[in-house]
Amino acid sequence: MKLRVAVERGDKKFFATAVDWPGWSRSGKSREEALARLVEYCERYKASIGNSAGKLTPPSSPDDLVVVATASGDKNIDYGVPHSIMTFDREKLTDRDLGTQIKLLEAAWAAFEEESLTAKGKTLISGPRGGGRSVAKMVEHVNEADRAYIGALGAKTPAASQSRADVHKAFIEALHAKVRGELPEKGPRGGERWPARYAIRRSAWHALDHAWEIEDRLP
């Protein structure tokens, strides 16, 4: 069976996302490059997710992928963020589906935690122009993003002083509340709140993207 993927198009970049495997998203300068990089990163994704990826059969080439959703996004895609809410993100999740998705999200979170602890106290290699956050700044950045994602779901944003464990707990509680229909679909100014499925894949992608950045930048 072919792997279901979604493709987002920006002005300069494309993002390919594995629909059923939150966190597995890669970008490229063309649709073909994005799909190829998604395939290329499968083993790395499996290594990061661990036992949670037990049923994932690696595609051997982009021919093993089937694009089931497409979207034209905004400047965030060119910046390097999978930013489009797609049709599959709005599909109703059963309790079992939600549990599976949360398990994969927690595995992505754990992968980032492990890499950040491995690199704690080390100076990461900078890019050719000297860019890149320190490990401490990256941890702060990822935690701040997850706090914002909780707000995007329509739940109360945790205080900045809360620990990462507390933010994760609040995130999971917000996901359950979203699926139960207890959180608003629109914000106070009419903007759309995030569906649970999109919040999961966005947070999982963000955690893994920075986990892999740490791996790549370790001296």
Image: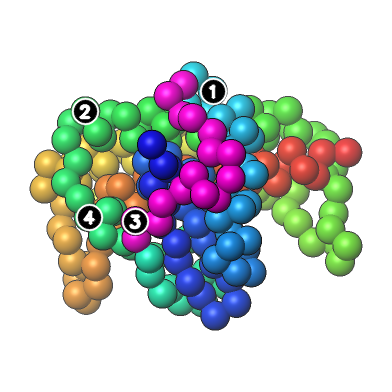
Q: CA distance from mark 1 to mark 3?
A: 26 Å
**Residue corresponding to mark 2:** 96
**In terms of sequence position, does the residue under pointer 1 or pointer 3 come before the other?**
1
Q: CA distance from mark 2 to mark 3?
A: 22 Å
Q: Amino acid at mark 1?
A: Gly
Q: Amino acid at mark 4?
A: Arg
**Residue corresponding to mark 1:** 50
Who is closer to the viewer here, 83 or 132? 83
**In terms of sequence position, does the residue under pointer 4 or pointer 3 come before the other?**
3
Secondary structure at numbered mark 4:
helix
Q: CA distance from mark 2 to mark 1?
A: 20 Å
Is residue 61 on the magenta stretch? yes
Where residue 131 appears, x then y in whole percent? 79, 61
Q: Amino acid at mark 3?
A: Val
Task: Classify 10 Å Cα crowding around label 2: few (below 14), some (14-19), many (20 and above).
Answer: few
**Residue corresponding to mark 3:** 68
Where residue 215 appears, x then y in whole percent? 74, 38
Left or right, residue 111 beside residue 93: right
Residue at point 18% right, 66% down?
186
Q: Amino acid at mark 2?
A: Arg
Quadrant position of residue 127: bottom right
Tell me the tag on residue 23.
none
Residue at point 54% right, 80% down?
11
Where residue 112 appears, x then y in whole percent? 59, 35
> Pointer 4 and pointer 3: residues touching (CB < 8 Å)?
no
Q: CA distance from mark 4 to mark 3?
A: 14 Å
Residue at point 38% right, 65% down?
70
**In terms of sequence position, does the residue under pointer 2 or pointer 1 come before the other?**
1
Q: Which residues are magenta?
A: 54-69
**In terms of sequence position, does the residue under pointer 2 or pointer 3 come before the other?**
3
Task: Classify 10 Å Cα crowding around label 4: few (below 14), some (14-19), many (20 and above).
Answer: few
